Image (cartoon, rainbow, N blue to C red):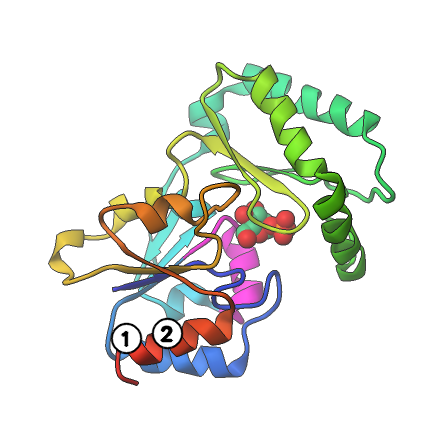
Amino acid sequence: MCLFDIDGTLTPSRQVITPEMKSFLLELKKKVVIGIVGGSDKGKQEEQMGGDVTGMYDYVFSENGLVAYKDGKLIGKQSFIKDWMGEEKIKLFDNFCLRYLADLDIPKKRGTFIEFRDGLINVCPIGRNCTQEERMEFFEYDKEHKVREKFVEALRKEFSDMGLQYSIGGQISFDVFPKGWDKTFCLGLIDNISQFKAVHFFGDKTYPVRGNDYEIFMDPRTIGHTVTSPDDTIKQLRELFNM
Ligand code: M1P
């Protein structure tokens, strides 16, 4: 089985899959079971992967697997907000973020600063409504000013007893979810995982600090592969499976 991170592994970050990668994955699917796993919700995964992902790949794990599909059918869904955190804690968390955001002095702010997904909360200092150009500006600004790192540190300090985990995987935002609900969560949803001779995981952010692929890359149930770009993913797969 091959499991893939999306951003930076199958597609350039937040960009659409190339026709070359799409047809390569179809070829690969003849040889192995394919799964994709990412922090985004299914709608965003479909935008990026160019269509009906659950019809195309054997397993689709959205929001790190908190929403999971096998052979096109929903096999698992957790509701982070309702079942785990509870309205009181959500309110405390939101209020803190909104106050922090109000005091945050960055060059541009747009809209949708907090996005509730089924399995995680995504916090975005510039706002998810920003354009692609503004996204890249913020990404560069953040490299220097560490806006997201400082925000996460403030949240860690404020909510140290809430059992939350933070991941700065993308370019403009960070994800917040319960400890353990990282990408390894999806492994528990694979039917009889020991039936596979190997479960290969491919990701670009496999480093321990800020790397949202690190936990699944290191998990004893997978063989981890670090890639540097979608082209590198294809290169490594060609070597591994003699394609
Ligand atoms: O790479 C995965 C991340 O992609 C997006 O991040 P951003 O918009 O910051 O580039 C988000 O969907 C995020 O939740 C996800 O983890």
| Horizontal relation, residue 224 to residue 146: left or right | left
| Residue 48: in magenta span | yes
Question: In this picture, is 180 found above or below 37?
Answer: above
The quadrant in which residue 47 appears is bottom right
Q: CA distance from mark 1 to mark 2?
A: 6 Å
Q: Residues within 10 Å of mark 1 (few under 14, many from 20)?
A: few
The x and y percentages for residue 125 are 73, 38
Q: Residues within 10 Å of mark 2 (few under 14, many from 20)?
A: some
The magenta region covers 37-51
Residue type at the position of mark 1: Leu
* Quadrant that contains the N terminus: bottom left
| Residue 17: in magenta span | no
| Horizontal relation, residue 104 to residue 69: left or right | right
* Quadrant that contains the C terminus: bottom left
The quadrant in which residue 69 appears is bottom left
Question: In this picture, is 206 found above or below 90?
Answer: below
Q: Which mark is residue 240?
A: 1
Tell me if I can see residue 93 in this picture.
yes
